[in-house]
Image: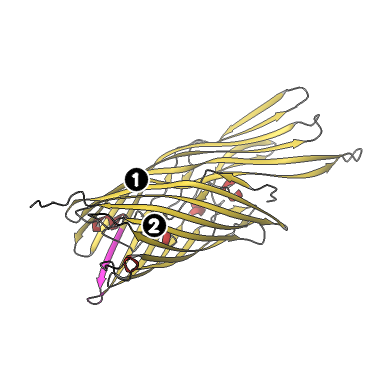
Amino acid sequence: MCVACATSYAQSGTNSPYSQYGIGVLSENPGAQSRGMNGLGIGFHENNQVNYLNPASYSSIDSLSFIFDAGASAQITQFKEQGATFNARNGNFEYIIAGLRLAKHLGASFGFVPFTNVGYSYSNSGKIENPNDGTITPYTNTYNGEGGLHQTYLGLGWMPIKNFSIGVNTSYMWGNYERSVINQYSDASINTLSRNYKADFNSIHTTLGLQYTLSLSKKDAITLGATYNFAHELGTKPTFSIISKNSQTSVSDTTTYNAGKGMNLPSALSLGLMWNHDQRLKFGIDYTLQKWSAVKTPVYMEKNNISSYVLVNNMYNDRHKVTLGGEFCPNVLSRHFFSRIRYRFGASLVSSYLKINNINGPKEFSMSAGVGIPIINAYNSRSLLNISAQWINQSSSSFIKENSLRINIGLTFNERWFAKWKVE
């Protein structure tokens, strides 16, 4: 992957060249609390936070509150390859989620969260030599792509017995991607070749979750959590078209291929553990396995002079992710402002699901730190301004290296809609 590009800015979730592969760059860490802990959350449950990562946690939502959480991010990324360096910036409105108690031990959540992002624009250039007369002709390859997969969800969490909760998120997923590769020569007599890849998505996605809390002492408890995402088809027929056009004669020829239905998303299993000390210190670990090796993806093939665009599996690697993180609040009931601030931290190690020319994609290491700052008002100090910073490194000896700094800002409104006010 050879990239030549100037500093750029985009209002999308990514500008990574890696988003040209698969269904794009995976979006993670929805929710302000999770972002501060670098995506940790399978074992976490709070009465004043919505934890989208495990629907079983909704059973813990406070019966008097309506919780609303929204966030945005800004990111700067440095790309390095073959001694060349350039920067890119992007910003994005990330998510909206909400939660409330429906009945005793029964909570609900709904919202909008991204799943993947596609957004890139770069080019490379070279020269070819005519073997007959030795003529040198410069050429340029231009790569562009945009799109992504989004989801709106509705979830329920229920505690059927003490300390044990189950939950489910059902999501409607939709989106698309459009990618193009344009091969253009300085000699106008040589045809310009354009390859265009398109797909439109819509499907239903289901996630099951559970949590079990075990008390160790009056001040200490651990929670075990697990989620399972079912594999499902994306309800799309990806297309691939090749356009050959001569700029001198304006004559063009277009061939379009259809891969048919069957493109899908993988199943995923996540396990988490959270230790809670006196509601002040919380520390956890998560592990996630996504079975991308079983996913079918469209591939253009030529065999025996016959061209086709077909769905093929074993084009990706299974994706593994391990996250460590936690949250510390000196005293949530203190009258001192800084004692009520929530301090968050986290780190993750991720293996890429991508295979690029049969070479494993870049490994990812990331760290985060953040705070949840109480918003003071006359009747309710439980709302939070959440700010976090994430450093993300993707490196490989074979491909472009990425270093990103992302700033996340979110507001968690925790309003006591269902409290009974007494007037004297």
Residue closest to the eye, 52 or 356: 52
Specify the quadrant of the image occupied by residue 327.
bottom left
State how the image is colored.
Answer: secondary structure
**Residue 228, image x, y percentages:** 37, 56
Residue 258, relative to residue 381: is it above or below?
above
Residue farthest right in this picture: 133
Amino acid of disc 1: Gly
Amino acid of disc 2: Asn
Residue closest to the eye, 193 or 328: 328
Specify the quadrant of the image occupied by residue 374.
bottom left
Looking at the rendered structure, the number of numbered marks drawn on it comes to 2
Q: Residue at x 16, y 52 (%)?
A: 419
Query: The magenta stretch spans which residues?
Result: 210-219
**Residue 84, image x, y percentages:** 71, 55
Q: Residue at x 36, y 65 (%)?
A: 342
- Tell me the CA gap for discs 1 and 2: 18 Å
Q: Is residue 207 left or right of residue 407?
A: left
What residue sits right under mark 2 in the picture?
Answer: 386
- Mark closer to the chain start, 1 or 2: 1
Q: Can residue 400 be spotted in the picture?
A: no
Q: Residues within 10 Å of mark 1 (few under 14, many from 20)?
A: some
Residue closest to the eye, 387 or 177: 387
Q: Residue at x 65, y 42 (%)?
A: 143
Q: Is residue 218 magenta?
A: yes
In the rendered structure, find residue 111 and report the number of the disc placed on it. Answer: 1
Q: Is residue 331 left or right of residue 238?
A: left
**Residue 69, image x, y percentages:** 34, 50
Q: Can residue 144 be spotted in the picture?
A: yes
Tell which tag, 1 or 2, sits nearer the viewer.
2
In the rendered structure, find residue 91 and report the number of the disc placed on it. Answer: none
For the stretch drawn in magenta, the main secondary structure is: strand
